[in-house]
Image (tube, helix red, strand yellow):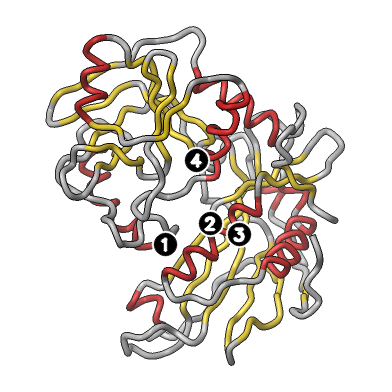
């Protein structure tokens, strides 16, 4: 990948580090951050200098458009360290493409690919000691863009801030996961922004998810907004169903996030000879499969969780439990992907990217 020399890079190192204060064996996801962050402002019609600086608060005018009209997009990525202390990313080009796809939908200027990698690699190199090598550990990467222009007129902003913050992570989900199939609330609709990784998509699902949590379920699996008859995705994951020995997942659309882990599972399934269908999946089909014993597995897939088994589901007051399997597709795919991510196995697909230090 070529380096963008048009956008300058400035690094201001912190005088201190808090890494010695961190208990890496007891991390709460997304609550601990490294010593530095990256900022790059957009104004006068172009992206300005990339600044890596000590992590800390940012100052915004109360009328900044992000607060009033929600122009905010983000991504989720992870960095890993191999046995030789080299830093690796997993399919980072896909995250950059999706960031810009979200940007276009929300009338935000796209961020150049070369500048994205130039800044990200410099930040990761500076924070390499935060990347732990023990099993399940990674450095979670959160790139995001917000509208910073002052004013409450309902128009796209002319000024933005691109940022990257880093957070050491262990496994995202732990314990048993059961889900509620949505039959009232909707996450997105055709023609909307469901495919974009934008802040409002997540804010809108917090309340229905809280109701599900209060009833004993960890996640909501969203159904189509028109009929609530077809299954689409979970709040933070794409969803797969194993019916017999066939893997089934919903197609992407303008309602569903095009997940990087989802793409990887589909590719792995094809390479391993596992039958897989990408098609519309009705709630009725899954209920019937649960009743007749052919629904063997459900699992979620996403950057944070990688692959997370789902032990049961509920729809309109009826609960269903899935069987316990000695050998599951969920564990197979999780082991395969994490082994590639951490460079413990070969990468026949060219998915891993070595960070230049």
Element assignment for label 2: loop
Q: In which quarter of the view is residue 345 placed?
A: top right
Mark sitting earlier along the chain (1/2): 2
User: Are the residues at dot 1 and dot 4 in contact (C-beta closer than 8 Å)?
Assistant: no
Residue projecting furthest to the top: 326
Q: Which residue is mark 3?
A: 96
Q: According to the image, label 2 marks what residue?
A: 75
Residue 211 point in image, percent of width and height:
20, 42
* Residue shown at the point (59%, 92%) measured from the top left: 44
Of labels 3 and 1, earlier in sequence is 3
Asked if the residue under mark 3 is in contact with the one under mark 2, i.e. CB atoms within 8 Å, the reply is yes
Q: Quadrant of the N terminus?
A: bottom right
* Mark 1 nearby-residue class (10 Å; few <14, some 14–19, many ≥20): many
Q: Quadrant of residue 3?
A: bottom right
From this view, report whether residue 354 is shown above or below residue 348.
Answer: below
- For label 1, the residue is 198
């Amino acid at each position: 990948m070529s380096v963008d020399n048009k956008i300058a890079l400035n690094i201001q190192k912190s005088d201190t580090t808090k890494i010695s204060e961190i208990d890496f064996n007891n991390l709460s996801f997304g609550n601990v951050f490294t010593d530095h962050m990256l900022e790059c402002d957009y104004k006068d019609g172009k992206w300005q200098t990339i600044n890596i600086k000590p992590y800390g608060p940012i100052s915004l005018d109360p009328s900044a458009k992000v607060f009033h009209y929600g122009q905010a997009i983000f991504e989720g990525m992870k960095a890993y360290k191999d046995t030789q202390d080299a830093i690796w990313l997993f399919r980072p080009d896909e995250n950059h493409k999706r960031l810009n796809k979200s940007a276009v939908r929300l009338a935000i200027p796209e961020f150049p690919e070369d500048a994205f990698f130039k800044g990200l690699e410099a930040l990761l190199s500076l924070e390499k000691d935060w990347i732990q090598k023990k099993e399940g550990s990674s450095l979670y990467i959160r790139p995001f863009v917000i509208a910073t222009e002052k004013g409450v007129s309902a128009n796209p902003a002319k000024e933005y801030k691109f940022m990257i913050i880093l957070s050491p992570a262990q496994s995202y989900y732990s314990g048993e996961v059961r889900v509620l199939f949505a039959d009232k609330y909707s996450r997105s609709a055709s023609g909307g922004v469901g495919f974009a990784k934008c802040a409002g998509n997540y804010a809108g699902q917090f309340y229905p998810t809280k109701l599900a949590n209060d009833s004993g379920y960890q996640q909501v699996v969203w159904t189509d907004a028109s009929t609530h008859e077809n299954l689409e995705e979970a709040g933070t994951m794409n969803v797969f169903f194993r019916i017999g020995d066939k893997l089934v997942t919903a197609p992407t659309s303008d309602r569903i996030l095009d997940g990087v882990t989802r793409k990887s599972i589909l590719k792995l399934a094809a390479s391993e000879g596992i039958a897989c269908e990408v098609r519309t999946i009705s709630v009725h089909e899954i209920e019937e499969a649960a009743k007749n014993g052919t629904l063997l597995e459900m699992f979620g897939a996403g950057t944070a969780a990688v692959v997370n088994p789902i032990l049961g589901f509920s729809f309109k007051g009826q609960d269903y439990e899935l069987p316990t399997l000695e050998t599951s597709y969920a564990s197979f795919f999780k082991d395969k992907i994490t082994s590639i991510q951490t460079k413990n196995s070969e990468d026949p697909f060219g998915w891993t990217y070595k960070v230049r230090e």
